[in-house]
Structure formats: C-alpha cells, structure tokens
C-alpha cells in the first residue's frame, strides 16, 4: 500500500524528479550565474489551497535546489491580467516563465512569440495542439494523466457504495468543461463502472473555478438524486462540493492536493503533482534540458499523479483491489479514457 499512497511533498519532488527528468529532451547545459524563473497564476490565485498554491510551492522548492535562482510571481485577478503578467515578466528578463494552467494558453502563446529567447512552460496543456501546434519552440507543455488516478478513486467510490447498499449513485462536479477537467471525470466514471457495474454516475459543471456556492448547488442537486459520493474537480469552487457532502453525511473526494485535512468525510483525493511539474520545468530550462514544442508527461508510473490519504473506513480488500488496478494501469494493461462520453 505504501507504494501507491501520497507521499510527503519534498520527498515526492525528489523521487519524481529522478524518474520524470528523463522525459526532458537533452541539450547542451547552459547555466547562468543568476537564472530567473517566474510563475503566472490563473484567476484562482495563489491562496486557492490547491492548484495554484501547489505550483507556487514547486517554484519555491526550485529556489532551494537551484543555486542562485531568483524567482518571481504574478497573480492574475482576472483573465485580462494574463497577457500583461506574461509580458511584464518577459520584459524584466525572466528566463523561464510558467503559466499556471489551461486557461492561459492563448495569452502565453502570444507573448512567447514576441519573446522568442525567453523560455515558457504551461501547466495542463498539450503544446502539440492549438494554439501552439508544436511550432512555438520556446514553450513546453506540462501534462498530467489524471484519468489514471481518477480511475482508481472512481473504483473506490463504486466499491464503497456497493458495500453500503441503497442507491448505487455517485456524483462529480467539474468546473469549466475543458480537457484537464474532463480527464478527471472520464477516469472517475470508468473506474466506478469497472468496480460496480450497476452504478450511476451523475456529472455536472459549475462553469466556475472560484465561487463555492455554485459548486455546492450542483452537488446538492446530485445528492438529492441519491448520490452517496461527491468528487470535487473544480479547484476552490469545489470546496463547496465537499462541504455539501459533509452536510449530507456522505463521502467527498478531493482534487489536486490531498484534501483529507477537511475532515473524516473525505474518502481520498485525486492528487496532481503540479509542484513537481513546475520544479522540473525550471530545472530543465536552467540546465539546458528544455523540451520546447513538446510535453513532459506526469502519470502514475512516475508519481506525477497519485491518490491521497485513504480513509481508515476502507476495507483492506478494497485497498488490494485498487493496488491491483494501479499495477495494470502502470503496465499499460488498462488505459482509462480521457474524454467524457
């Protein structure tokens, strides 16, 4: 079980770095005396207790591991801040700039073209597709196979509902319908049906990543339809989903970070190591190993995605089932879907 549970952040960064760094295309090392790296948040901002905050942790970790590294941040209060935040960093001579998510792609692509000698990376975006199309050679993608760990948490949700009996229904609340959100949903639905063939999975979108009330409303509607487990895939907004689960006395599943700290109603979390991605992107750019026009891929095998703490209420036989499925995914025998049917 220790092989697949979430591990301490610093230890995980080191462990994943040892494996995932081989994914970075090699090149001639060209370190400088003072290397500068920056991070531009999305509208969730750096105090979101999840996606953005974890990337900030990766930036700060890089500063402790790369000698002489200077770091800077730019917090986006609205989508209108993305382009000026990127441009301001580039003009200041920041060598490597990371965009904190899918929503920043268009603006990052525009600024990257204006500053071809500056290196960029973007979390949760495949840069071989539009608008980059693999042609913006100073941008690297940081992608996460969240369909894999979501498959496992979906299976666990299905097993726990089967054990309890009653309405065989679970739910998931996504934020905006974009590929990084749908990969969570697709894996969750497939995993639940793998382990509980008779289950119904309710899915909904809040159309928001910030407003907790919107997610809570979607979750409450699902709970009214009999949902016994609610999965948060909406960042800070999703705290409303988990609050609805707590109030209803049912299980909640966290996202991005281990959200077990929210209480005993948290069954587990689908962890996405975006801190690792930020650190490795900066490390690779600083030492000459930058995969411009390509992606770094983080998955179960290299520890880039994982399950968080699992409730002590989960039977040992369920843990064994999850471990077996994890092994099959790592071996390529199970390939969870990335798109919602």
Image (tube, grey):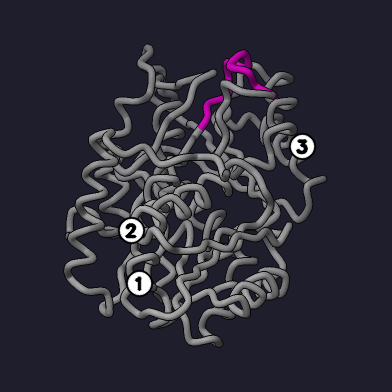
Q: Which residue is mark 2?
A: 195
Region in magenta:
131-141
Separation of marks 3 and 2 at Cα, in angstroms: 45 Å
Q: What secondary structure is found at the residue carrying circle 2?
A: helix
Residue 199 within the segment the image draws in magenta:
no
Residue 135 within the segment the image draws in magenta:
yes
User: What number is the disc on residue 83?
Assistant: 3
Pick whichever, 141 or 270, lies toward us. Answer: 270
Q: Residue at x 55, y 77 (%)?
A: 226
Q: Earlier in the sequence, mark 1 or mark 2?
A: 1
Please provide percent x and percent y for residue 162.
Answer: 35, 72
Quadrant in which the N terminus is drawn: bottom left
User: Is residue 286 visible in the rendered structure shown here?
Assistant: yes
Separation of marks 1 and 3 at Cα, in angstroms: 48 Å
User: What number is the disc on residue 162?
Assistant: 1
Q: Residue at x 21, y 74 (%)?
A: 315
> Are dots 1 and 2 in contact, CB under 8 Å?
yes
Examine the rendered structure and indicate whether residue 282 appears above or below residue 42. above
Pick whichever, 291 or 226, lies toward us. Answer: 226
Please provide percent x and percent y for residue 16.
Answer: 29, 42
User: What number is the disc on residue 81?
Assistant: none
């Amino acid at each position: 079980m220790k092989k697949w549970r979430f591990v301490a952040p610093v230890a995980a960064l080191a462990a994943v770095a040892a494996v995932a760094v081989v994914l970075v295309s090699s090149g001639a090392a060209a370190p400088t005396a003072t290397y500068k790296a920056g991070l531009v948040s999305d509208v969730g901002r750096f105090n979101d207790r999840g996606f953005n905050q974890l990337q900030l942790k990766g930036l700060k970790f890089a500063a402790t591991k790369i000698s002489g590294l200077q770091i800077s941040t730019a917090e986006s209060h609205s989508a209108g801040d993305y382009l000026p935040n990127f441009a301001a960093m580039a003009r200041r001579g920041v060598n490597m700039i990371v965009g904190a998510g899918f929503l920043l792609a268009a603006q990052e692509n525009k600024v990257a073209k204006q500053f071809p000698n500056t290196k960029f990376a973007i979390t949760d975006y495949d840069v071989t597709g539009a608008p980059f199309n693999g042609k913006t050679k100073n941008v690297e993608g940081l992608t996460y196979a969240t369909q894999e760990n979501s498959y496992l948490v979906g299976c666990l949700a299905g097993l726990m509902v089967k054990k309890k009996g009653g309405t065989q229904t679970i739910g998931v609340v996504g934020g905006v319908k974009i590929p990084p959100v749908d990969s969570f949903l697709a894996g969750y639905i497939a995993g639940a049906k793998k382990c509980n063939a008779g289950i119904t999975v309710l899915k909904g979108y809040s159309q928001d990543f910030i407003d907790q009330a919107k997610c809570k409303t979607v979750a409450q509607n699902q709970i009214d339809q009999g949902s016994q487990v609610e999965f948060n895939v909406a960042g800070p907004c999703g705290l409303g989903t988990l609050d609805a689960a707590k109030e209803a006395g049912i299980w909640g599943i966290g996202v991005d970070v281990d959200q077990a700290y929210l209480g005993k109603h948290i069954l587990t979390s689908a962890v996405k190591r975006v801190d690792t991605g930020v650190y490795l992107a900066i490390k690779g750019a600083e030492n000459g190993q930058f995969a411009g026009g390509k992606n770094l891929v983080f998955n179960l095998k290299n520890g880039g995605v994982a399950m968080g703490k699992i409730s002590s209420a989960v039977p040992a036989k369920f843990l064994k089932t999850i471990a077996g499925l994890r092994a099959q995914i790592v071996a390529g025998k199970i390939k969870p879907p990335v798109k919602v049917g």
